[in-house]
Image (spheres, rainbow, N blue to C red):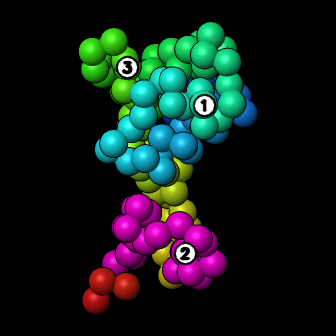
Amino acid sequence: MEKKIATGLFESLSSGVRLDVYRLLIRKGTEGMVAGDIASVLDIPPTNLSFHLKALVQAGLLTVEQEGRYQRYRANIPLMLDLIAWLTEECCADHPEQCAGFRSASTCYDAVLPPLKLSKEDKT
């Protein structure tokens, strides 16, 4: 991931409303939600919500699909996992054994974290 892309993702999530929308859609997984339901759950006026949805789509954090007269939004989970991997890929770069302790203290599932990069000594 390029730094410019990562910065754009963080900027688009810097709004509390957008962060709430993204977290709601993460919970919904591949099912996603239509805009009206998102507005109802988060108690956001539809006109205000459409502005935030557009920004999240432009950033690539959401996808949108037309369903009749509704638009269904889904979180781009692979992109977020790429961002997490990019942020953590250099964790304790020369001392990967230290990362194991950080991982056990984290609430993040191991499956979404990048693999530990072992040093040559650790591989033998």
Q: Are marks 2 and 3 in contact (CB under 8 Å)?
A: no
Between residues 71 and 102, which one lies in front from this camera angle? 71
Q: Amino acid at mark 3?
A: Gln
Q: Position of residue 48 (x, y in %)?
A: 66, 14
Q: Nearer the viewer, mark 2 or mark 1?
A: 1
Where residue 103 is drawn, which disc sits there? 2
Determine whether 65 is above or below 115 in the image. above
Query: Does dot 1 land on a helix, a strand or a loop?
Result: helix
Q: Residue at x 42, y 34 (%)?
A: 33
Q: Position of residue 114 (x, y in %)?
A: 40, 62
**Residue 115 visible at all:** yes
**Residue 79 visible at all:** no
Q: Nearer the viewer, mark 3 or mark 1?
A: 1
Q: Amino acid at mark 1?
A: Ser
Residue bounds of the magenta highlight: 99-120
Measure the alpha-carbon separation of dots 3 and 1: 15 Å
The disc, 2 or 1, on the residue closer to the chain's N-terminal end is: 1
Query: Does dot 3 land on a helix, a strand or a loop?
Result: strand
Q: Position of residue 12 (x, y in %)?
A: 60, 26
114 falls in the magenta region: yes
Measure the alpha-carbon separation of dots 2 and 1: 36 Å
Res 2 quadrant in image: top left
Look at mark 3 in the image and give the residue it sits on.
71
**Which image quarter holds the N terminus?**
top left
The disc, 2 or 3, on the residue closer to the chain's N-terminal end is: 3
Other residues around mark 1 within 10 Å, as few (<14) / some (14–19) / many (≥20): few
Res 22 quadrant in image: top right
Look at mark 1 in the image and give the residue it sits on.
40
Is residue 81 rendered to the left or right of residue 97?
left
Determine whether 20 is above or below 99 in the image. above
